[in-house]
Image (spheres, rainbow, N blue to C red):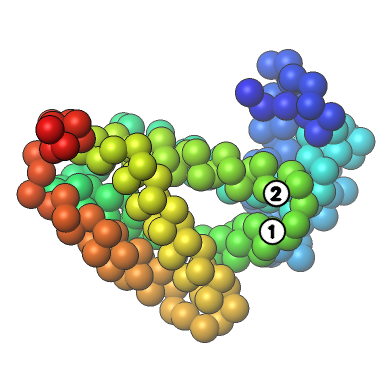
C-alpha cells in the first residue's frame, strides 16, 4: 500500500495527486535532467501544492526514486501484455532486460536523473528502491518457474547489482549506454546456463526429488 511520509494511507484522490506529481517530475527530468527538477516547478506543473507534495515525498530524491518505481511498474504491465519470448529461461529474461535497456537508450537524460537520485541515503529512496526490486521480481519470477525461491533470490540479487553498477558507470561517462544491455545479457546467460535445458513447466521440487 502506498503511504504518505508519516505512514498514513492515501485516499484515491491523494493517490491521483501523487501520480500527477510523479508524472510532472518525470517530464522535468526527461527535459533537463536531475538539476532541472525543483519541487516548486513540480508543484506548478502538477497543480499540487508544495506542502502537499512534501506529505507524499520527503525530498526530491525520494520523488525521483518513486518515479523509477512507476517506470518499472509500467515495464511490468507491458511484459504482462506482451509476454517475454524465448525457448530457455535465459532467453526470456534477456528479452525483458533488453526491453528495459531500450527504454534507457530512448530516455538517457531521464535515466541519468533517476540513477543519481538512487545514490542518496534518504530513507524514502531506500523504500522506493525496495519497491523497484519487488517490481523486478514480479517481472522475472514468472519467467523462472523452474527455480526455487532461494535460487531466484540469488540470481535476481546478482542481476540487480550488475544493472546498478553498469548504470552508475554509464551515468559517470565511463560506458556507452549500449553496454548496459550487453552486460546484463552476459550476466543473465552465465547465471541461467544451468537451467537452459529445463522445460518451463518443470517445478523446482521435481528437480530435487
- Taking the view exactly as shown, the residue that stands out farthest to the right is 51
Q: Position of residue 36 (x, y in %)?
A: 76, 62
- From the viewer's perspective, is 111 left or right of 177? right
Instruction: Please name the residue that numbered disc 1 is placed on.
Output: 117
Please, is residue 76 above or below residue 99 in the view?
A: above
Query: Where 32 falls versus 94 (above or below)?
Result: below
The quarter of the picture where the C terminus appears is top left
Graded by Cα atoms within 10 Å as few (under 14), some (14 to 19) or many (20 or more), the crowding at tag 1 reads: many
- The image quadrant that residue 192 belongs to is bottom left
**Residue 83 visible in image:** no
Instruction: State left or right for residue 14 relative to residue 197.
Output: right
- Percent across and percent down for residue 71 are 53, 44
Q: Is residue 195 above or below residue 112?
A: above
The structure residue drawn at horizontal position 69% and vertical position 58%, both measured from the top left corner, is 117
Report the residue marked by disc 2. Answer: 125
Report, in whole angstroms, how far the alpha carbon at label 1 lies from the one at label 2.
Answer: 8 Å
Which quadrant of the figure contains the N terminus?
top right
Task: Give me the residue at 53% from left, 76% from top.
Answer: 169
Would residue 118 be found to the left or right of residue 169 on screen? Answer: right
Describe residue 135's horizontal placement relative to residue 21 as left or right.
left
Q: Nearer the viewer, mark 1 or mark 2?
A: 2
Point out residue 60 in the picture as x, y percentages from the top left corner. 78, 51
Can you say whether 185 is above or below 15 in the image?
below
Image point 72% across, 32% down: which residue?
18
Asked whether 123 or 102 is in front, the reply is 123
Cβ–Cβ under 8 Å for marks 1 and 2: yes
Amino acid at each position: 500500500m502506498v503511504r504518505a511520509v508519516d505512514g498514513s494511507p492515501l485516499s484515491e484522490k491523494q493517490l491521483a495527486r501523487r501520480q500527477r506529481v510523479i508524472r510532472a517530475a518525470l517530464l522535468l527530468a526527461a527535459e533537463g535532467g536531475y538539476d532541472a527538477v525543483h519541487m516548486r516547478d513540480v508543484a506548478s506543473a502538477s497543480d499540487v501544492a508544495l506542502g502537499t507534495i512534501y506529505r507524499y515525498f520527503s525530498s526530491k530524491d525520494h520523488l525521483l526514486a518513486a518515479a523509477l518505481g512507476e517506470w518499472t511498474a509500467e515495464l511490468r504491465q507491458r511484459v504482462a501484455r506482451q509476454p517475454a519470448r524465448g525457448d530457455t529461461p535465459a532467453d526470456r529474461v534477456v528479452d525483458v532486460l533488453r526491453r528495459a535497456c531500450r527504454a534507457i537508450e530512448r530516455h538517457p537524460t531521464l535515466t541519468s536523473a533517476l540513477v543519481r537520485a538512487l545514490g542518496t541515503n534518504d530513507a524514502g529512496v531506500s523504500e522506493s528502491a525496495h519497491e523497484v526490486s519487488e517490481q523486478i521480481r514480479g517481472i522475472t519470477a514468472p519467467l523462472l518457474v523452474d527455480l526455487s525461491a532461494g535460487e531466484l533470490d540469488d540470481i535476481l540479487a546478482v542481476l540487480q547489482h550488475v544493472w546498478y553498477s553498469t548504470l552508475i558507470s554509464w551515468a559517470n561517462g565511463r560506458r556507452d549506454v549500449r553496454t548496459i544491455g550487453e552486460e546484463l545479457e552476459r550476466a543473465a546467460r552465465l547465471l541461467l546456463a544451468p537451467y537452459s535445458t529445463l522445460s518451463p513447466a518443470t517445478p523446482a521440487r521435481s528437480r530435487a526429488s
